[in-house]
Image (spheres, rainbow, N blue to C red):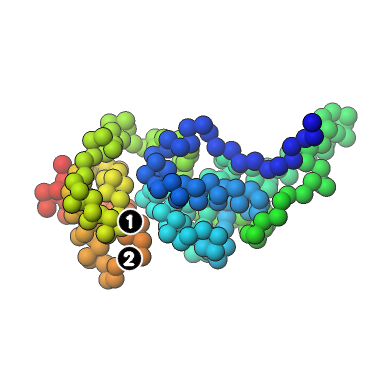
Amino acid sequence: MPRDKRLYMTFPIDFHRHPKLKRLPVEVRWTFVEMNGEARIADNDGVFTHEDAEFEWPIDHLERLVSSHPTRPLVVKTDTHYVIREFPEHQETKASREERRAKNAANGAKGGRPRKNPPGTQQKPSGLRVGTDSQANETQQKAESESESEDYYSPLESQSSSNRASVSTDSFEISEHTRASAARKGVDLQGIAVALNGIGIRVDAYGAMSLANHLLEKAKSFPSAPQRYVLGCITQSPHEIAKYLHDSGLAA
């Protein structure tokens, strides 16, 4: 049987259980999978220009990935690029592949293991531009420095089991009226509750909706990405948020 020369991306078998992914619509999850695949094809180490990413995928999908966590999202948006966080930790990069090729070549020269991926082996073409090692590494490192390091395939270690349980689907009850209000405003109440949990405040669905309304009404103009705006406010002004919730009697 001929050797399979296709490229592969790696995901653990419990990938679908990650809390960040579970809260996203299936089509947004698939966009994340496609981004990893296209990154391998384009050999760009998970770094896409705004132009390439927004041409390839719906902007609202990208925004949902960027707002998937207040400090450790699945995808980071910089001034110029969308970056898959911690891509080098899970997928093969140009640098790691070149290092492996060099080792294989050295082993082959010594009569050891034959070389893998010889120079003649070509990757499938991609519609996305191919990045250079220095460009991809620099942008990837910048994105990592702007967000906390965390394995996006593993459960959130920063939250205790009790904290996660406190905002689980089973215990976080949302009335039909509140659910409809959240849909109209474009916010995810459970995601807001999780973010508040991160700063030591527990709220119910009504409290999360009230906070979202308060923050969105204070904005100079209605944000194009309401959920990301609310989560950003929580991250940037935790003390002000806490004071508002306590003064309003919304904190549990």
Crowding around mark 2 (Cα neighbors within 10 Å: few <14, some 14 to 19, many 20+) is some
The image shows residue 1, relative to residue 172, as above or below, that is above
Q: What residue is shown at x 22% (from left), y 66% (from top)?
A: 218
Quarter occupied by residue 236: bottom left
Asked whether residue 136 is in view, the answer is yes
* Residue 220 in the image, given as x and y percentages of width and height: 27, 71
**Badge 1 element:** helix
Q: Amino acid at mark 2?
A: Pro
* Left or right, residue 223 beside residue 80: left
Q: Which mark is residue 212?
A: none
Q: Amino acid at mark 1?
A: Gln
Quarter occupied by residue 91: top right
Q: What residue is shown at x 82% (from left), y 29% (from top)?
A: 113
Q: What residue is shown at x 28% (from left), y 38% (from top)?
A: 169
Q: Which mark is residue 223?
A: 2
Quarter of the image where the N terminus is located: top right
Front residue of 83 and 147 = 83
Name the residue furthest bottom: 220
